[in-house]
Amino acid sequence: MEQTKTLVLDKAKTIALIQFATLLGIATVAPLFHQQWLTGPIVNAMFLIAVALLGTQTAIMLALLPSTIALAVGLLPAILAPMVPFIIISNTIFILGFDLLRKNNYWLGVFLGSILKFIFLWSTSSVVINLLLKKEIASQVSAMMSWPQLATALIGGIIAYIFLKGLKKV
């Protein structure tokens, strides 16, 4: 006799699934704007909101998808393909740094996560980009992976704070 497993979605699981799908949708659509100063804060805010609403593991899973999807569908320039794993790791570092301090001090969590993300992405991108790209292109890509990453992460923290404050989650 064949055994069948049934997945039961209670109200909490349904809400979490809807929240995840919404955050993923926003984080995936944001690159359509093709503006780092708009996309970066939105995506970073989605990561922080995911940590607060769904937990760190789910936020990390969310961090795996936007860059991968953007590259797969042509939203991320192919020249940045070698950076995708480093972007994913930097987003994971951002999430973990934020989660480490957020319960004691939201802003210290945002600052720590942002600084760690910036340091990791800037240092790895300098090496990877200079090894793989022509010098003219390398400097443009390297600039994208430097201080704007810190700024967009911090701005994402502000956006997430406003949203989470409205939900009374901070």
Image (cartoon, rainbow, N blue to C red):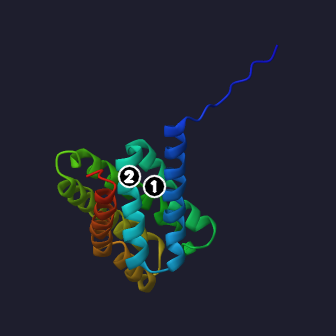
- Residue closest to the far top: 1
Determine crowd level at label 2: few under 14, some 14-19, many 20+ residues with C-alpha closer than 10 A: many
Label drawn at residue 36: none
Left or right: 154 in relation to 11: left
Q: Give, as a three-letter code, the residue at label 1.
A: Ala
Where is residue 153? Give x, y as percent: 31, 66
Q: What element carries label 1?
A: helix
Q: Along the line of sight, which residue is nearer the eye, 135 or 143?
A: 143
Q: Where's the N terminus, which quadrant?
A: top right
Where is residue 117? Give x, y as percent: 31, 60
Left or right: 103 in relation to 141: left
Q: Name the residue under label 2.
A: 92
Residue found at x 69% / y 24% = 5
Question: Is residue 18 positioned above or below 82 on the image?
Answer: above
Where is residue 137? Give x, y as percent: 45, 83
Q: Mark 1 points at which residue?
A: 63
- Residue closest to the far bottom: 136
Q: Give, as a three-letter code, the residue at label 2.
A: Thr
CA distance for labels 2 and 1: 6 Å
Where is residue 166? Give x, y as percent: 32, 59
User: Counting residues from the N terminus, which is met first, the one under dot 2 or under dot 1?
Assistant: 1
Question: Is residue 101 positioned above or below 162 on the image?
Answer: above
Residue found at x 37% / y 58% = 90
Place residue 49 in its image quadrant: bottom left
Determine crowd level at label 1: few under 14, some 14-19, many 20+ residues with C-alpha closer than 10 A: many
Q: Along the line of sight, which residue is nearer the eye, 74 or 50?
A: 50
Q: Are marks 2 and 1 in contact (CB under 8 Å)?
A: yes
Residue found at x 54% / y 69% = 29
Q: Along the line of sight, which residue is nearer the eye, 52 or 67?
A: 52
Q: What element carries label 2?
A: helix
Left or right: 15 in relation to 49: right
